[in-house]
Every structure is written in structure tokens, then in C-alpha cells.
Amino acid sequence: MKFVGVDLHKQSITVCVMAKDDRQRKVLARRRFACCRSDLIRKFFEELGRFQVTVEATSNYEWFLLLVEDLADRCVLSHPKKLRVIAESKNKSDKVDAQVLAEFLLLDIMPEAWRPTPRVRQHRVLVRHRRWLDGRITSIKCKLRNKLAYYNADIAGLFTERGMHHLAGVAMSEADRFEVQQLQQELLLFTTQMEQTENQLREFARGGPLAEQEARAVLATIPQVGPVTVDAVLSELGDWRRFRSMKRVVAYAGLDPGHRESDRKVKRLSISKEGSRILRWAMIQAAWRLVNNSPRWKCIFENLKTNIGSRKKAIVGVARRLLCTMFAMLRDAQPYELVRAG
């Protein structure tokens, strides 16, 4: 059995092939390919015989795994943050990185990353695109309001039909009017794209497997949690059954608080902010809606705020508890009224 480490970049890949003989590890081959020569890459792996291959979970790994996974006995996606030995190496190079990956795979100590299924990848593309569009729309609206504030002409309901008539009638300089017209065109474009994306997501949800349909139904029983939050949770968590505990789910969302201990003193640090940014954003937004509309969650928030002394930290605590509740609901297939997180 051969063990192959692949250091993948946008333009090239570096390959190191290793094997174990009489308890000794040895390098059998090293190669470097341009990424555009997929024919040569495929041919090289076809000639290896039986092999296992590993590559880091970078943004562009999928095309490589699709190219060779039918040839390999095993494909392993390595976790880049857990594989600190490469990041902290003083003699870092593509050649060294590929060999380290091959050795970790040979020794069976590779920290693995989860590889999303094709459906989860598609779901993430749509959800993340919607989030991007939402950010662009918000930015344009803020610029338009700022422009009107400059002329002391900002009004409530600016983005209604009446507000657009008001905007057209405000006297402003030729340059400012040009910018406003450009912003209005962008706003119309992104708003149209947002509607199309929402329709695409609804169509995507209708075509989901039974387990996903049940998960959507379960999460939808939470007050103030709508399709946007449900999509963010399901797309970013993927297969929630892979998480062994609530603690791991919280860490995946980057909502886990850090701490430092020294001389019997414990210093509380801010949350890690690692993992899924969209999941973290969705939880905090949903937490604010619950706090403003639910007496139970409002009480939790007020107690946290009193103990911590900060509104921002308190709402993060509520978001963390909400995510744990959602995970418990998914794990136990129970609606919100019956679930008990813990």
C-alpha cells in the first residue's frame, strides 16, 4: 500500500509517495504538476497501484478528489488548523508539506476534516450567496441614507415607492445625483437577484431527502426562527449526527468562550470565532429576535447580562444556548415545545 500526500495550490500540486518497509518509512516518488494538466495527474495516480491519498481542506480541493477518488482505496481530507506541524515548520516548502501529509497518513494519525456531500455543498453555495446579496443590499441602503442625511432629507420608509419619489425630488449636486442613480440601479439589481435566490432555495428545499425535510420541520417549531435561519443551520452543520456533543457544535460555530488558567486564577476570554461565520451570524440574529419577543429567552438574557455585565456577551450566551437547543431537537427529532437541551 502506498501513501500519497498532496500539497495543493491554485496553479500547481506537489505529490509525495511513501511506503513502509520493515517498519521504516521511505519516499518512493516526488512529482510536481500544473493543475491544468489533469490528464498527467490522472495518469500518474493510475500507475501507482493501490494507494491512499490525503490533501488539505483548502478552498479548491474538490476537483482533485473528484479526479482521483475512484482510483484510491481511501481519500482523506486533512484539517489544516489541526495539522500545526506544517504551519509551524521552519523549513516550510511544498516538498516538505507533501511529505508531512504522506507521513501522517502512513502513521494513521491524520486529523481529518469532514467532507460535505454534494447536496450540502450546493446548499452552502445558495445560502452563502444569499448572505452576500443581503450584505450588498444593506450597504447600498446605508449609502443612500447617508447621502440624504448630508442634505438633511432622510425620511422613514425611504425604500418604499413614496420614499423613492421623495429621493427623486431632493435637490442635490450633479455628482451626488449621478451616484444616487447608480446606487438605485445596483439596489434594483441585487433585490431582483435576492428574490431569484430565495426562489431557488425554496425549490432546493422541496427536493430534499426525508431526513432533511424532517429536520426543517423540527427547527421551524422554534418561535422567531424562519427559513433563513433554518437554511443557515442545516447547510453549515451538514450532517449534524457527526457531532458527538453540544460542546463540539458550539465550537464549530465559533461560539465557544476561551479561558486562561494561571496561579489558580481563571481569565475568561472572548469567543474563538473559528468555524462557520454564517452559522454564528444566524444564531446571534435569531437570539436577538427571541430575546425581544419571548419572555423566557428575555429572562435568560437579563440573567446573563447581570452576571456578565455586557449586552454583547449576554446575547452571545443566548445564541450559544439556542444552538444547543437546536442540536438537541435535531438529535432527538423533537419539536421545540418538548425539547430539553442539556
Image (spheres, rainbow, N blue to C red):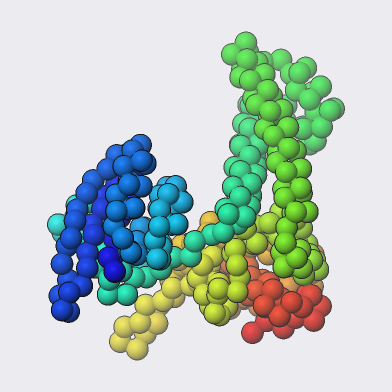
Q: Can residue 252 be seen here?
A: yes
Along the viewing direction, whichever of 250 and 317 lies nearer the viewer: 250
On screen, residue 116 versus residue 133, left or right, reads left
* Residue 319 placement (x, y as % from top left): 63, 68
Q: Residue at the spot x=22%, y=68% of the render?
A: 19
Q: Residue at the spot x=73%, y=43% of the render?
A: 200
Relative to 109, is 197 above or below? above
- In the picture, the quarter occupied by the C terminus is bottom right
Residue that protrudes farthest toward the bottom in the picture: 264
Q: Residue at the spot x=78%, y=54% of the render?
A: 206
Along the viewing direction, whichever of 171 and 220 lies nearer the viewer: 220
On screen, residue 273 versus residue 288, left or right, reads left
Along the viewing direction, whichever of 256 and 215 lies nearer the viewer: 215
* Residue 300 placement (x, y as % from top left): 69, 76
Relative to 228, is 160 above or below? above
Q: Can residue 296 be seen here?
A: no
On screen, residue 262 versus residue 92, left or right, reads right
Image quarter of residue 228: bottom right
* Residue 137 placement (x, y as % from top left): 65, 36
- In the picture, the quarter occupied by the N terminus is bottom left
Q: Residue at the spot x=40%, y=66% of the render?
A: 74
On screen, residue 258 versus residue 262, left or right, reads right
Image quarter of residue 318: bottom right
* Residue 252 placement (x, y as % from top left): 51, 67
Residue that protrudes farthest toward the top in the picture: 174
Residue that protrudes farthest toward the right in the picture: 162
